[in-house]
Image: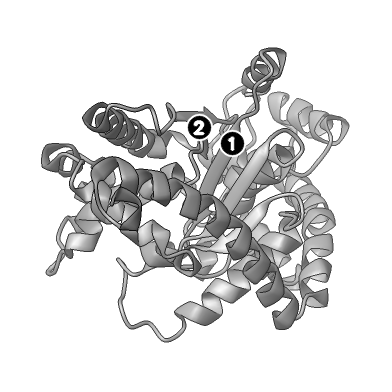
């Protein structure tokens, strides 16, 4: 990733990055180490636009009366984690109506076959009694989210690369149809994988849907965190081996995300020799996790709802300035709206 930014800098170019996160509940370690830490680091390297994508959350349950509160809380959590509304554009998706407008236009460009092949749609719809058109169609909204700001890089994990590829196909098809290169070539920005697994079942990715024993929320108190770390699945141990069980590997993954190498190496050496005490490993995970999470919790507690709302209003104004300019060009090119007459 750093090499890509260096190449862009040498060429005199500057990447524009877009990413979004759904307000589905509290953030956990998988979100923090898998995505948000990367978002924070990107702010020092390029232009960043980050959105709480509440329209996407409607595919889960329309009419959820807690959605607005979760949206506000998530924005506050992102700020506490280090997303700086001064350096980045941070806003709520539904506060910029151009997202919905561009989605409809892209609906008329996207291929039904492409949407039907999306792996996540197949996974989420399997066994469902009701499958909404929104669930089928949400990758088009994702494409609109990115292309509305003419972003050219999207920080994603491997499981989202298919969606970035679809966004690129939609952009190319639109450009070809109108005969102008309005939208840029989108590329996924893959960071080193930090895949955090469930503490109770380390064969599964950490997720809130598995239940409270399977994840650590970043706003959980020290005692609650220690209770979950202490009960984390490891293995029977006692044999010298380079190989790690999934549970031990997961604890080391958390440690690598929070601790310096000099704190990790003695524990790795003890594991290779078959002399690692899991109590020592878990206590190290606890201590370094607390050192990482405590400042985040303190910053979040210091943020008022009014401060978060003000940051989001300012972010939406900045986002709409870009979005209006893009949509003005789109309308002109396809012959709709006042710009076309």
**Mark 2 element type:** loop
The location of residue 132, given as percent across then percent down, is 18, 65
As rendered, which of 164 and 295 lies closer to the eye?
164
The residue shown at (54%, 36%) is 245
- To which quarter of the image does residue 83 belong? bottom right
Q: Is residue 106 left or right of 267 when viewed as pictured?
A: left
The location of residue 99, given as percent across then percent down, is 40, 57
| Circles 1 and 2: CB atoms closer than 8 Å | yes
| Mark 2: few/some/many CA within 10 Å (<14, 14-19, 20+) | many
Q: Is residue 39 above or below residue 207?
A: above
Q: Residue furthest front?
A: 341
> Can you tell which mark lies on residue 114?
none
The location of residue 158, given as percent across then percent down, is 43, 33
> Can you tell which mark lies on residue 152?
2
Q: Is residue 134 above or below residue 180?
A: below
Q: Residue furthest bottom?
A: 65
| Mark 1: few/some/many CA within 10 Å (<14, 14-19, 20+) | some
Q: Is residue 120 left or right of 159 when viewed as pictured?
A: left
The residue shown at (28%, 47%) is 120
Identify the residue position indicated by label 1 in the image: 16
The residue shown at (48%, 37%) is 157
The location of residue 113, given as percent across then percent down, is 12, 38
Q: Between marks 1 and 2, how big is the CA–CA gap?
A: 6 Å
As rendered, which of 84 and 208 lies closer to the eye?
84
| Colour mapping | one colour
Q: Is residue 93 left or right of 242 when viewed as pictured?
A: left
């Amino acid at each position: 990733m750093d090499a890509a930014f260096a190449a862009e800098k040498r060429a005199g170019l500057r990447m524009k990055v877009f990413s979004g996160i759904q307000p589905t509940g509290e953030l956990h370690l998988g979100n923090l180490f898998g995505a948000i830490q990367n978002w924070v680091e990107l702010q020092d390297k390029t232009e960043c636009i980050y959105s709480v994508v509440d329209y996407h959350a409607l595919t889960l349950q329309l009419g959820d009366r807690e959605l607005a509160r979760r949206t506000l809380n998530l924005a506050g959590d992102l700020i506490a984690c280090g997303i700086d509304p001064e350096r980045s554009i941070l806003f709520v998706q539904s506060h910029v109506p151009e997202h919905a407008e561009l989605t409809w236009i892209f609906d008329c460009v996207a291929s039904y076959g492409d949407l039907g092949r999306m792996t996540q749609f197949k996974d989420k719809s399997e066994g469902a009694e009701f499958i909404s058109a929104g669930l089928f169609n949400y990758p088009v909204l994702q494409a609109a989210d990115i292309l509305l700001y003419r972003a050219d890089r999207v920080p994603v994990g491997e499981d989202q690369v298919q969606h970035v590829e679809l966004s690129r196909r939609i952009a190319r098809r639109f450009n070809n149809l109108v005969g102008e290169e309005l939208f840029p070539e989108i590329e996924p920005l893959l960071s080193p994988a930090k895949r955090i697994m469930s503490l109770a079942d380390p064969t599964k990715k950490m997720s809130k849907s598995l239940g409270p024993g399977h994840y650590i929320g970043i706003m959980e108190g020290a005692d609650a965190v220690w209770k979950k770390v202490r009960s984390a699945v490891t293995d029977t141990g006692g044999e010298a081996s380079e190989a790690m069980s999934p549970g031990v590997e997961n604890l080391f993954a958390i440690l690598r995300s929070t601790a310096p190498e000099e704190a990790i190496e003695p524990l790795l050496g003890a594991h290779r020799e078959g002399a690692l005490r899991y109590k020592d490993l878990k206590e190290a995970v606890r201590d370094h996790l607390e050192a990482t999470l405590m400042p985040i919790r303190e910053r979040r507690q210091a943020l008022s709802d009014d401060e978060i709302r003000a940051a989001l209003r300012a972010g939406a104004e900045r986002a709409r300035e870009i979005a209006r300019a893009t949509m003005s060009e789109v309308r002109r090119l396809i012959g709709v709206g006042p710009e076309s007459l």
